[in-house]
Image: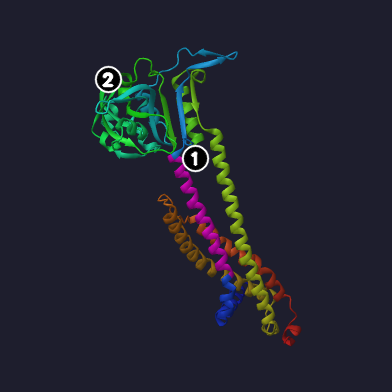
């Protein structure tokens, strides 16, 4: 039985070699379908990765915030929370070590202070944020000039500061904002060297500055909520946010009794749901486009194979008269269809990859999006190969059954 199947397959493959034009026409539909599938899925992966990086860079969707509750609502009125924990940098270090799904962590506290540049005499009331060094990994802001804190500066009370672009422009009073670099400004009367200036933000209105966390008590004054800092943890991916939140809650449960009433753990749940829904819709849409492309290729195979059956009716009759069974004829045509599909799949993957790479390069150059990268996932290649084999099997079955059902006498008499 195996020998007969191999013999029928060999006859089918031989027919493909003897009719190269017909084979090319049969393969062309699969090449187009698989190339479209690879292009659509690869472009989808590239766009998804790009969107994820943009969300990570410009939003807090992957951030989990931990802070002591300042109050709770009792009968609609705010009641101060007693015994709220005071988090320290040691707690931050311990929590970070217990959270392998976190990419970055930081601690911060904010307050208002007056910032003055003596050279111009300009001063502004500024929202000053004291942070640990981990904030740079969150990628929320970019520097226009200068540098961020070093690890040593962040851990110690180093007299350095990074100014927002709007604040630097106001303090410079007509000068270039770069004129403030390596200059000293006064924050609550204390001199701080300007080591960096943030990039301008569209619609920027408020004034901001960033100092090392160790300088919080000195810079922010006695009224700042230094005892209730924010701890922020960034998940490695959107999918890891829930597990990160649960891991943080487990850590809090081992440290503080009844922590739910004294500590709040915040995530952007509504935004996260919208992001996940957007990714799901995009994948379904791209999958539908790929399915249509493969369907077109499959119909092309079936049409060509039906034409083959009609063209080779006399050949089928002669094979049956010589003793070939219907099963042998069916295996012959199925082997042809699967061979065409597999060869078309290999060429289609190559064509689709080249097309996608060209499109990505074009979009990246036109839109100035350096984060957009070409992606060809192994799953895409496997899906294309499996789809091609299934197409050959499904759309080659009907022509094969039709060929196998022909009467030998009628087939031989066919003109």
Q: Quadrant of residue 29?
A: bottom right
Magenta stretch prevailing secondary structure: helix
Relative height, residue 273 to residue 393 (above, below)? above
Specify whether residue 119 is in view.
Answer: yes
Image mark for residue 308: none
Q: Position of residue 385 (x, y in %)?
A: 54, 62
**Residue in the image at 58% along x and 42% along y:** 277
**Residue in the image at 45% along x and 19% along y:** 256
Image mark for residue 238: 1
Q: Position of residue 160 (x, y in %)?
A: 27, 29
Q: Secondary structure at mark 1?
A: helix
Relative height, residue 317 to residue 141 (above, below)? below
- Label 1 vs label 2, nearer the camera: 2
Q: Position of residue 137 (x, y in %)?
A: 37, 37
CA neighbours of label 2 inside 10 A, class few (<14), some (14 to 19), many (20+) = few
Q: Quadrant of residue 333?
A: bottom right
- Depth order, front residue of 181/155: 181
**Residue in the image at 60% along x and 57% along y:** 289
Relative height, residue 293 to residue 70 (above, below)? below
From the image, tell me which residue sits under label 2: 189
Q: Which residues are magenta?
A: 29-57
């Amino acid at each position: 039985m195996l020998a007969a199947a191999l013999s029928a397959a060999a006859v089918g493959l031989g027919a493909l070699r003897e009719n190269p034009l017909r084979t090319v026409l049969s393969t062309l539909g699969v090449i187009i379908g698989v190339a479209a599938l690879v292009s659509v899925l690869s472009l989808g992966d590239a766009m998804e990765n790009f969107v994820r990086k943009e969300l990570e860079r410009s939003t807090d969707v992957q951030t989990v915030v931990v802070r002591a509750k300042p109050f709770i609502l009792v009968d609609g009125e705010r009641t101060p929370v007693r015994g709220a924990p005071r988090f320290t940098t040691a707690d931050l270090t311990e929590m970070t070590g217990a959270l392998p799904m976190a990419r970055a962590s930081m601690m911060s506290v904010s307050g208002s202070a007056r910032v003055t540049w003596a050279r111009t005499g300009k001063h502004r009331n500024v929202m000053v944020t004291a942070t640990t060094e981990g904030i740079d990994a969150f990628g929320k802001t970019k520097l226009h000039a200068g540098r961020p804190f070093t690890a040593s500066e962040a851990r110690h009370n180093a007299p350095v500061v990074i100014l927002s672009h709007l604040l630097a422009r106001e303090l410079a009073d007509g000068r270039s904002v770069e004129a403030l670099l390596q200059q000293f400004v006064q924050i609550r009367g204390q001199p701080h060297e300007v080591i960096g200036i943030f990039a301008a933000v569209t619609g920027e209105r408020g004034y901001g500055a960033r100092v090392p966390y160790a300088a919080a008590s000195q810079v922010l004054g006695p009224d700042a909520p230094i005892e209730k800092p924010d701890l922020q943890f960034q998940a490695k991916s959107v999918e890891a946010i829930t597990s990160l939140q649960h891991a943080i809650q487990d850590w809090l449960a081992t440290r503080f009794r009844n922590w739910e009433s004294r500590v709040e753990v915040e995530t952007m749940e509504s935004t996260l749901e919208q992001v996940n829904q957007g990714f799901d819709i995009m994948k379904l849409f791209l999958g539908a486009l790929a399915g249509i492309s493969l369907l077109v290729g499959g119909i092309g195979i079936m049409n060509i194979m039906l034409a083959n059956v009609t063209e080779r009716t006399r050949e089928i009759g002669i094979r049956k008269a010589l003793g070939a069974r219907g099963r042998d004829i069916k295996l012959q045509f199925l082997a042809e269809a699967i061979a065409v599909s597999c060869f078309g799949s290999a060429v289609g993957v190559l064509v689709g990859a080249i097309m996608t790479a060209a499109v990505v390069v074009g979009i990246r150059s036109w839109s100035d999006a350096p984060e957009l990268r070409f992606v060809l996932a192994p799953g895409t290649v496997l899906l294309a190969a499996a789809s091609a084999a299934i197409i050959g099997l499904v759309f080659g079955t009907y022509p094969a059954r039709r060929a196998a059902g022909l009467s030998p006498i009628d087939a031989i008499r066919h003109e």
